[in-house]
Amino acid sequence: LAYCRLGKIEEAHKAFTRVTGPLNGNLNMAKMLERFAREDDAIRYYEAARTIDPQNTIALRRLADLYQRVGRASESDAARAALALASNNGTNNTGK
């Protein structure tokens, strides 16, 4: 958290990943970047989490919202469709 507040994003990501693993490291990093209104950076980390777990509902939900917020409607729609598919498949994968 301290690294994030200091703007040392890569160091923060390494620390989150070391403590919580790659998936949760990316999710935690993205959440912190959202708090600092760094939407494009947050998207990058949510997409990295999605690469690890394509049906992760946290990543998909946040990506849908963030893409909409930054004016990327087609990506938002795609993330919402993937989220609906994950939900219909009974996936409740929250990264925990």
Image: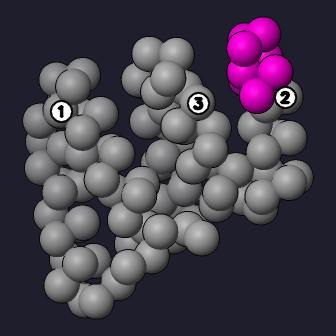
Quickly name the residue at label 3. Answer: 32
Q: Amino acid at mark 2?
A: Glu
Q: Which residues are magenta?
A: 1-9
Q: Looking at the rendered structure, which numbered label has been put on residue 68?
A: 1
Residue ranking furthest to the top = 6
Against 16, residue 22 (above or below) is: below
- Apparent side of residue 68 relative to residue 52 in the rendered image (left or right): left
Magenta stretch: residue 27 in it? no
**Amino acid type assigned to the residue bearing label 1 in the image:** Gln
Dot 3 or dot 1, earlier in sequence: 3
- What x and y, as percent, mark residue 92? 38, 79
- Which coloring applies here? one colour
Q: Is residue 6 magenta?
A: yes
* Element type at mark 3: helix
- Asked if residue 59 lies left or right of residue 60, the reply is right
Mark closest to the chain's N terminus, 2 or 3: 2
Q: Is 73 on the left-hand or right-hand side of 94? A: left
Residue under pointer 2:
11
> Does residue 75 appear in the picture of this structure?
no
Residue drawn at x 47%, y 59% is 50
What is the quadrant of the C terminus in the image? bottom right
